[in-house]
Image (cartoon, rainbow, N blue to C red):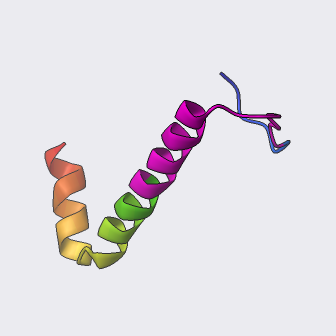
């Protein structure tokens, strides 16, 4: 799969697809929030440990 800046438009998405996209957005938001709340030393330690 490649990255493009052009949006993908889906006409009449199913409820399942809408739910999947909603869950992905929520997960991304929560992951970003975790990163924002991390202290710099925690972040560097986690990177080294992985």
Question: Is residue 42 placed above or below 24 in the rendered structure?
Answer: below
Quarter location, residue 9: top right
* 13 lies left or right of 30: right
Q: Determine if the magenta segment contains residue 25.
A: yes
Pinpoint residue 45: horizontal percent, then vertical percent.
16, 60
The magenta span reads: 7-27
> Looking at the image, which is closer to me, 45 or 34?
34
Q: Determine if the magenta segment contains residue 9.
A: yes
Residue for point 58% across, 33% down: 17
Name the magenta segment's main secondary structure.
helix
Pinpoint residue 16: horizontal percent, then vertical percent.
53, 32
Pinpoint residue 18: horizontal percent, then vertical percent.
59, 41
Question: Is residue 47 placed above or below 34 in the rendered structure?
Answer: above
* 34 lies left or right of 49: right
Q: Dividing the image into 4 quarters, which one contains the C terminus?
A: top left
Label tally: 0
> Looking at the image, which is closer to me, 39 or 33?
33
Question: Is residue 6 placed above or below 34 in the rendered structure?
Answer: above
Quarter location, residue 30: bottom left
Q: Dividing the image into 4 quarters, which one contains the N terminus?
A: top right
Question: Is residue 45 placed above or below 24 in the rendered structure?
Answer: below
> Looking at the image, which is closer to me, 9 or 12?
12
> Looking at the image, which is closer to me, 22 or 42?
22
Residue for point 19% across, 73% down: 41
């Amino acid at each position: 799969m490649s990255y493009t800046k052009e949006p993908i438009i889906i006409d009449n998405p199913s409820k399942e697809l809408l739910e999947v996209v909603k869950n992905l957005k929520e997960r991304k938001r929560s992951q970003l929030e975790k990163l924002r709340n991390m202290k710099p030393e925690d972040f560097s330690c986690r990177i080294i440990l992985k």
